């Protein structure tokens, strides 16, 4: 599962990617600096794993991770191949969610590809390019589906009806994610179409350091614009985040954050938001050898969760011993949790909850 960082050139995408991944994607003051997509495997900040480490004192700790992709800047006309449009759009298609970075700061030293700062126009430029690409995809698919629908094929007729609705939505300059599937068949078809604008999106307002806590007029404009999209808006001062990553010690970083009025780096907030955007959650295993956070999809059953560790665990699943993280934290050990009667035994139908501490019994 990957989240792709998109935006116009020079809005701070590669600098943000460097902050998130500590990879050093090239960052320069001109468009198309990043051509190949950079992929960073990023640890998901989670204070719960620090608490488990404190209680269990394991030999090693493994955090959950999420893949972040730095995609080069899109420009007007990308859907028709302008700039390096087709390649960029292909890279976005391969991602499961979109982190859309918008420039919300004034700085005469950093060139804006359209001459002035206007996050509303910038957002619309990107949205239109993605919508045009999806319209092209839908119309190509309709050519084939229309022929089959005319023969009386019921499946083709259902697909045509959905494609017509999506096409109309895109023609109105709205994203395909605003089309609500009417039944499970339509849900499945929407997934099969692999449209770019059905992907969930998170907006990152890149602001100056002084606006990192409360935002500014540009952020207010973005919030007003996206209020009906049910999308999260995060404020981040990418320049300040880059400065924080350069500091050597935890203490220095904390002092810097306090001076800005923040309790943690904005990048940590963003990573957790991306994890949620991808519909991911965490369960833990906790033993003296290792405390580990495991990544699963929200809604996964206990056998599915076991399969993330090893496929044999899923095939031979017998039961799961489950402790809620809060109980583990409050009682301080597995033994004390058992004494208190808080350890549960769950079967194949159990839906894993975020933060469950689990031990699996299996037989292969």
Image (tube, rainbow, N blue to C red):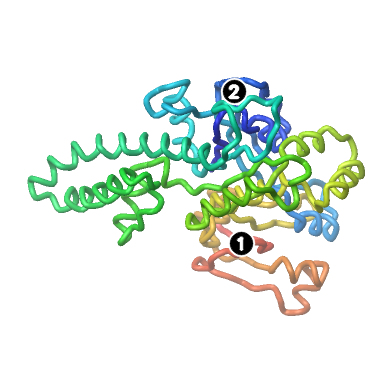
Can residue 326 be seen by looking at this rendering? yes
Residue labelled with disc 2: 34
SS state under label 1: strand
Asked whether 345 or 279 is in front, the reply is 279
Furthest residue in direction left, as rendered: 151
Q: Position of 120 compared to 220: left or right?
A: left
Q: Residue at x 57, y 38 (%)?
A: 118
Query: Are the residues flagged by discs 1 and 2 in contact, CB closer than 8 Å?
Result: no
Q: Residue 282, percent across and down?
A: 64, 56
- Residue 338, position as x, y percentages in the image: 75, 74
289 on left or right of 322: right
Task: Specify few, some or many for label 1: CA neighbours under 10 Å numbering under 14, 14-19, or 20 or more.
Answer: few
Element at badge 2?
loop
Q: Is residue 72 visible?
A: no
- Label 2, residues with CA under 10 Å away: few <14, some 14-19, many ≥20: some
The answer to whether 159 is drawn above or below residue 182 in the figure is: above
80 or 221: nearer the eye?
Answer: 221
Q: Is residue 171 above or below residue 53?
A: above
Report the residue at 35% width, 54% height from top: 179
- Residues 137 and 109: in front is 109
Q: Position of residue 344 (x, y in %)?
A: 65, 73
At 72% from the left edge and 41% from the top edge, which residue is drawn? 237
Q: Where does the image place residue 131, in percent across and percent down from the top left?
A: 38, 39
- Cα gap from disc 1 to disc 2, whole angstroms: 47 Å
Residue 342 found in image quarter: bottom right
Tag count? 2
> Residue at point 60% right, 48% down?
274
Question: For mark 1, what is the residue?
Answer: 361
Mark whose residue sits in front, 1 or 2: 2
Q: Is residue 41 above or below residue 215?
A: above
Sooner in the amino-acid sequence: mark 1 or mark 2: 2
């Amino acid at each position: 599962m990957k989240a792709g960082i998109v935006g116009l050139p020079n809005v701070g995408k590669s600098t943000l990617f460097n902050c998130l991944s500590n990879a050093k994607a090239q960052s320069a003051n001109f468009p198309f600096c990043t051509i190949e997509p950079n992929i960073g495997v990023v640890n998901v900040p989670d204070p719960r794993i620090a608490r488990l480490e404190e209680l269990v004192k394991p030999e090693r700790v493994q955090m959950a991770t999420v893949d972040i992709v730095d995609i080069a800047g899109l420009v007007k006309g990308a859907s028709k191949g302008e700039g390096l449009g087709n390649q960029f759009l292909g890279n976005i298609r391969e991602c499961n969610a979109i982190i859309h970075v918008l420039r919300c700061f004034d700085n005469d030293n950093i060139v804006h590809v359209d001459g002035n700062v206007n996050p509303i126009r910038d957002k619309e430029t990107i949205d239109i390019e993605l919508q045009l690409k999806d319209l092209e995809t839908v119309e190509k698919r309709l050519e084939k589906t229309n022929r089959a629908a005319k023969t009386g094929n019921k499946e083709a007729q259902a697909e045509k009806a959905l494609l017509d609705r999506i096409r109309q939505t895109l023609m109105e300059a709205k994203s395909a994610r605003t089309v609500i599937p009417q039944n499970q068949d339509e849900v499945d078809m929407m997934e099969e179409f692999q449209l770019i604008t059905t992907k969930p999106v998170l907006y990152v307002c890149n602001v100056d350091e002084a606006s990192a806590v409360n935002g500014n007029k540009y952020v207010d404009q973005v919030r007003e614009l996206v209020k009906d999209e049910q999308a999260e808006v995060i404020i981040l001062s990418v320049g300040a985040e880059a400065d924080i990553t350069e500091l050597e010690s935890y203490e220095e970083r904390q002092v810097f954050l306090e001076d800005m009025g923040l309790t943690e780096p904005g990048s940590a907030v963003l990573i957790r938001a991306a994890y949620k955007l991808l519909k991911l959650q965490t369960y833990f295993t906790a033993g003296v050898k290792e405390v580990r956070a495991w990544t699963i999809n929200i809604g996964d059953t206990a056998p599915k969760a076991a399969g993330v560790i090893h496929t044999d665990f899923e095939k031979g699943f017998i039961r799961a011993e489950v402790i809620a993280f809060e109980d583990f934290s409050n009682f301080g050990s597995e033994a004390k949790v058992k004494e208190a009667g808080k350890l549960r035994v769950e079967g194949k139908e159990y839906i894993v909850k975020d933060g469950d501490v689990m031990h699996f019994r299996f037989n292969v």
